[in-house]
Image (cartoon, coloured by chain):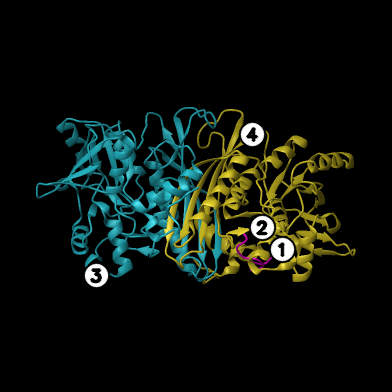
Chain colours: A yellow, B cyan
Amino acid sequence: MLSFIEQIKLSHGSGRGLDNLLEEIVLPILFPGNTEPMEDAYLIEKQSLFPVKTPYKKLAFTTDSFVVQPLEFPGGNIGKLAACGTINDLAMMGASPKLMSVSLIIEEGLSASLLQKILKSLYETCQAAGIKIACGDTKVVDKGKADGLFINTAGIGVVPKGRNLSVSFAKPGDLVFLSGGIGLHGIAILAARKNLHFASQAISDCNPLNGLVDALFSITPEIHTLRDCTRGGCAAVLNEISKASDVSILINQEDIPVPEVVQGACSFLGMDPLSIACEGRFIAILPKKSPSETKSILESFRKLPHAHDAAIIGHVVEKQSFPVMIQTNIGGIRMVETPPGELLPRIC
Amino acid sequence: MLSFIEQIKLSHGSGRGLDNLLEEIVLPILFPGNTEPMEDAYLIEKQSLFPVKTPYKKLAFTTDSFVVQPLEFPGGNIGKLAACGTINDLAMMGASPKLMSVSLIIEEGLSASLLQKILKSLYETCQAAGIKIACGDTKVVDKGKADGLFINTAGIGVVPKGRNLSVSFAKPGDLVFLSGGIGLHGIAILAARKNLHFASQAISDCNPLNGLVDALFSITPEIHTLRDCTRGGCAAVLNEISKASDVSILINQEDIPVPEVVQGACSFLGMDPLSIACEGRFIAILPKKSPSETKSILESFRKLPHAHDAAIIGHVVEKQSFPVMIQTNIGGIRMVETPPGELLPRIC
């Protein structure tokens, strides 16, 4: 098999670099002939693997490895993040998280008390989200052959009847809902890693999202797409939805909730808040609503924890030359691209 | 929480060192209050998570991370190993492997062609074992922060009705069945890593075991325990069974199939073949049989691929002062201990 990539680079870890690595090397080998869009979790359809009776129509199965640096950051640590990552991937398919596996790769020399602290965060996050740790594995590698600790989690969830979500279900006219202010996780990691005092107020948004997703389904039962804004931020997610659904998306800069510390850091560093990763925010694509329905959804949702600045940030339109466009505060329209890979490596 | 371990050492990666790390730190936090023995996979009982109709009574769920060095070795590579590890953990609970997740942690600088070769091995092993790759994740870390490639796999399997296995089900009088000659994986890794010419004939036994397990169930439908002899080799597995089942185990040195190259390398290096890891051999604890039944089971099983030297190597006895004992070729009896951790790190 011919490949244009000769050596893996750090920039292959996120954004367009990751897209290239996946499309050139990983996906053709592991998923040959697949034409389905990439979802956050694999859905096990009723009857295909084993018959599942009501009230659950499908199971969901997902995995993520976590290599974040530093291992501890304001608002969390790699343990909390590893739990949230898998819980949230399940939640984005509408699944209630049920079982998690936890696999540790420990670098020789890691302090036992730090390991304990991290595992406690992981456990407590699972408890809070109602997911059971079912199985695990522990490996130790020589000093200098890892980076303190890597954690893999995989998860199984059950999808309640009536929930039918996909990154490919966005339709022209749909609303783009954002669950809260963006970029806090990425800026918190950046500040901790580079010791940036001007961004030291940033606290990661890292949190389990299954409760908020359940709440949103109660408020508005029809949801077309859910996706959490992790690597590549909202910019990557909106581009993924646009591509998989064969539509364009138009968002309004003035409607996007950007916390002050994120705005400040991004202005100073020349970064776009839309490209900064969150670990506790999601985009929902909702079918078209009247203004009063929209207002009522937002009012109900904003009462929930971590959701006070949820917003409708735009809408889906027929496919145009640009997949994702933003109406800027100064009146122009520009394209929103999936960020390249090297912006902020190893944020999760 | 008080811990006697202050820093993780390489010796915490296997054998008694791993037992200590798990018992002091990992298990009390992730599985508080658990008194069940550790199995190779978590069983999802019918009705507890969702109702599952016949013909499957239970699902199984497991995970493993792979950090083997070198990435390629005689008889396989980390991709084949990562597929076999999860397939075999499911098979050891009697489950037919159905779905696998694959998560990559790639060190910057890994050659793309090596990555492709490894992923192809992983995929082909899954195809051969009938397990579908359902989902995945890819992370890249900076040069010097990993060791080429780490792979995590997690798996879901379904347990056919009538199969009810546990490491705690061994009973006095039961037979100890071994599926084939031991130690080839560990010696192949050692030879490749240390460039040991006298052991260069060793080809890893790394292989999916679900076919052999299905065959053994056809030959003899009642099996109490299955466990593959990975980290710590047969010595660790026999000690785990003895502990969980509250019995002792007596094996006969003359009945244990040890390939010539393994025997030679172990004699030269002063190692015990029982402590050397396999990645394609399992121990089965079978209920007591007549000599003619035993003979017929062995004759049928030995016709299968990779199984020509399968053997009954001993039997289970009432609990005695030593958990596992071996009748040696020179007529004595000695204790067989779980090996300490540092013997051969990173064999899987």
- Residue farthest to the left, as pictured: B330
Q: Pick the residue in front: B64 or A265.
A: A265
* Location of mark 2 (residue): A74
Q: CA distance from mark 3 to mark 2?
A: 52 Å
User: Is A62 one of the magenta-colored residues?
Assistant: no
**Which mark sits nearer the N-terminus, 4 or 1?**
4
Q: CA distance from mark 4 to mark 1?
A: 41 Å
* Location of mark 3 (residue): B197
- Which residue appears at 82% of the width and 60% of the height? A326
Looking at numbered disc 1 in the image, what kind of residue is underneath it?
Answer: Ser
Q: Which corner quadrant of the image does residue B138 belong to?
A: bottom right
Specify the principal SS of the magenta part: loop
Q: Are marks 4 and 3 on the same chain?
A: no
- Chain letter for mark 3: B
Q: Pick the residue in front: A311 or A317.
A: A311
Q: Secondary structure at mark 3?
A: helix
Looking at numbered disc 3 in the image, what kind of residue is underneath it?
Answer: His
Q: Residue B171, percent across and down?
A: 27, 31
* Location of mark 4 (residue): A160
Q: Residue A41, percent across and down?
A: 59, 46
Which disc is residue A200 wearing? Answer: 1
- Residue farthest to the front, as pictured: B2
Residue stretch in magenta = A337-348
- Chain letter for mark 4: A
User: Is A346 one of the magenta-colored residues?
Assistant: yes
